[in-house]
Each structure stands twice: as C-alpha cells, then as structure tokens.
Image: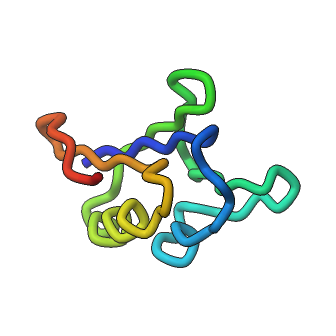
C-alpha cells in the first residue's frame, strides 16, 4: 500500500496526525508533515505504508477534510478518497 500527501492542499486541521503517527504537526508552516516520505513532485509526498499501519493510514486519509491524502493498494488502484 502507498500513500500520497499533497502538502499544498493541506489546511492544517491536523486530523491526520490524530489518526496515524506517520503524520506530524509543523506548527511553523501550519501544515502536516508525512514522516519518511519522498517528495515526488512539488509539495507531493509519497511513502509505502507498513502492513501493520494500513488501517491507520486509511483512517488518516478519510479524516482529511480537504482530501489531501490519497491511498493506493499494491496494484496502484486508488482506495481513498
């Protein structure tokens, strides 16, 4: 499973932080940060989701009020949103 986080879309509600500890608060920027991710495009961060964190990653994506988080399965199919 893979997760993508669009930092530009983020509005800093930090609901993802409450759902998965891979998301952290960046109070200075007023946005979340996806730990251990790689910036693949400007403000687009991607990382693999460990098997034991798949449910948390899905909850983080569902909790985002602006759909800045997208989850894909191992075949590349978009699961959330």
* Image coords of residue 17 (percent x, y): 57, 70
Is residue 25 toward the left or the right of residue 36 in the image? right
Q: How many marks?
A: 0
Colour style of the rendered protein structure: rainbow
* Image coords of residue 37 (percent x, y): 53, 42
Q: Note whether 29 is above or below 12 in the view shown.
A: above
Q: Residue furthest right?
A: 28
Q: Residue furthest top?
A: 41
* Image coords of residue 14 (percent x, y): 62, 68
In-front residue for pair 69/45 = 69
Q: Residue at x 26, y 53 (%)?
A: 80
Is residue 58 toward the left or the right of residue 68 in the image? left
Q: Note whether 68 is above or below 44 in the view shown.
A: below
* Image coords of residue 31 (percent x, y): 71, 54
Q: Residue at x 61, y 50 (%)?
A: 10
Q: Residue at x 45, y 38 (%)?
A: 46
In-front residue for pair 48/14 = 14
Is residue 74 toward the left or the right of residue 6 in the image? left
Q: Note whether 78 is above or below 13 in the view shown.
A: above
Q: Residue at x 39, y 60 (%)?
A: 61
Q: Note whether 72 is above or below 24 in the view shown.
A: above
Q: Quadrant of residue 2?
A: top left
């Amino acid at each position: 499973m893979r997760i993508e986080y669009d930092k530009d879309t983020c509005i800093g509600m930090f609901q993802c932080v409450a759902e998965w500890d891979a998301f952290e608060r960046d109070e200075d920027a007023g946005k979340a940060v996806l730990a251990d991710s790689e910036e693949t495009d400007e403000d687009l961060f991607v990382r693999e989701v460990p098997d034991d964190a798949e449910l948390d990653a899905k909850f983080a994506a569902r909790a985002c009020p602006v759909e800045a988080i997208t989850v894909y399965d191992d075949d590349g199919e978009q699961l959330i949103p």
